[in-house]
Image: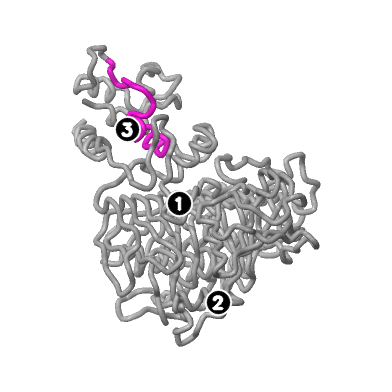
Amino acid sequence: MIYFVYLVIYLIAELCVENYSALVYPDENGRLVYQADSQGNVIPDFSNCGYKGGGVALPNVPVVRTVWPQVEGDDTARLQAAINEVSMLTPDSNGFRGALLLKRGEYRVEGRLSIRTSGVVLRGEGDGVNGTVIIATGTSDRTLIRFLGIGNPVKVAGTRQAIVDDYVPVGARTFEVENGSGFAEDDSVIVHRPGTQEWIEELEMDDLDDPWQAVKYNLLFDRVVTKVEGNFVTLDAPLGNSLDHNYGGGWIYKYTFTGRIEKVGIENIRGVSEYDDSVTDSNGNFIHIDHADGFVDFVDVKNGWARNLTGAHFSYSCVSIKESKWVTVQDVQHLEPVSPIVGGERYAFVLDGSPRDVNSQLILFQRCYSLKGRHSFVLQGRIQGPNAFVDCVSDEPYSDEGPHRHWSTAALYDNVRGIVGNNNAKINVRNRGDWGTGHGWAGANMVLWNCDVNTMIVQKPPTAQNYAIGCKGVITAGSEPDGYWESNGTHVYPRSLYYKQLEDRLGMDAVRAVATNEQIGRLMASKRVQGKIGQVQQGDFNGDGCIGFSDFLAFASHYGLREGQTRYNARYDLDGDKSIGFGDFLIFAANFG
């Protein structure tokens, strides 16, 4: 009971402050309004990030084959054979061949496992130490499990059309082309923003020791046409970078990508990398490097997922995504990586760059946790965006979160927290100059929303902007101009930008499909505080016209009950999920008083 009293006091103080951003705020109907700058740039809508474009529940695919642990020996060949067997099955009406279930126990894999066919799911029976545990044995530097498409996007001949607008702003989905007659709804298209020497000189990236080369800075946005009106084309998701005729403008064309695999996933598995614990640094940290460096990779994948996973001791990453689209990574944790604490190691959840131009976009990481990473939630070079990290935690980090190098665009850090085990809980969006491989301007049009860390650097690059809104942390200045800072030290409404954008676009059913009850409860509580969904008096259990301590006592006496239990009463189930839990408590706390 004392715990509940303290929690009520904390949440009332936290939730009952009306605080809006000047750039994103609710209208009289509760929908977000976006304030444009002088060129029309707005904070983008990130809600298209995730499986099937956001707001779609991850599927529960039926099991078609089952494998049990063996007493001893290497399991690589027999697990790969089982994967291949499922890969040969005929897809069902939803495009799934089925799930391969690895029963609880240990599996030893000296090589790697590869899924190269659409519609295959790898499933275990839990990511705890007593669940399904796959141990990466030996000293080979490799990723343990890979989802691999092949090939490249192929331009459809004769479909290229120049974009005629002088300037297409960040966040835009509609623009004019020379001739729109060749495009139709549901066309897969690429919007090409060319890299030019003039643009690189504007950024002063030609002054680096390793100068940027224009040919490496084409930005290709992978989109679907949703509407064509004359020569005006509308896309499903916004652009993460402006198209400026002063720097080459842009064009659009249709493409095919037959080698990209779809509808694949991995879930409920623990991956562990063996290592030599006799190799340590002067502080006693395990730094052995000759062992598996990654748990799961997605390469050339569309509509994939990783959920309910734990990776331990991998030197580089837990989940790495490259050249992929519409992938969700949720409820995944990376524990105690083993490597030297140096550059190139401990990138727990990473969007990796590629020599190709079509890098990963519309990816969602949510509810992920990293312990002792260096760059735990990170974008490598030229990641086009939008992409989103939502409700993620970096615990005892050795370095910063944020874009790492070479002009990645339009990533959302939404309620990303650093747990202070040292002074490295920080998010930086900056010009990294000659660091590394001439990292230069690491990110553009990045949005930090209601984040909590020790320190932050947010700088404004030429031709773009970066934003820190409602964040808590010490602002650290640098040699470059500051980005857009607002409400530092005090969170803003909505609590989660991603979930409010998703609600505005697709409705609350879409939010319920992908959020936990706690996340939904926080969203609903935030809405009630702002008074945007009517004069809701949920919590007035004694009917006296106010919500006070006696109502709290009544609520507390029913906390933890579920539908079907003797004392369950639906009037205390404020979020309607048939249980009385933390989500209901957040709503009650928001209405208290």
Mark 2 or mark 1, which is nearer to you? Answer: 1
Mark 3 or mark 2, which is nearer to you? Answer: 3
The color scheme shown is one colour
Amino acid tagged 3: Gln
Badge 3 or badge 1: first in the primary sequence: 1
Circle number at residue 139? 2
Residue that mark 3 sits on: 530
Residue that mark 1 sits on: 42
Answer above or below: position of 414 versus 317: above
Q: Is residue 525 magenta?
A: yes
| Residue 123 in sight here | yes
- Observer-nearest of 143 and 162: 162
Q: Residues within 10 Å of mark 2 (few under 14, many from 20)?
A: some
| For residue 311, side relative to residue 396 (left or right) | right
Give, as a single range, the part of the protein colored magenta: 517-541
- Observer-nearest of 394 and 256: 256
Q: Is residue 83 magenta?
A: no
Amino acid tagged 2: Thr
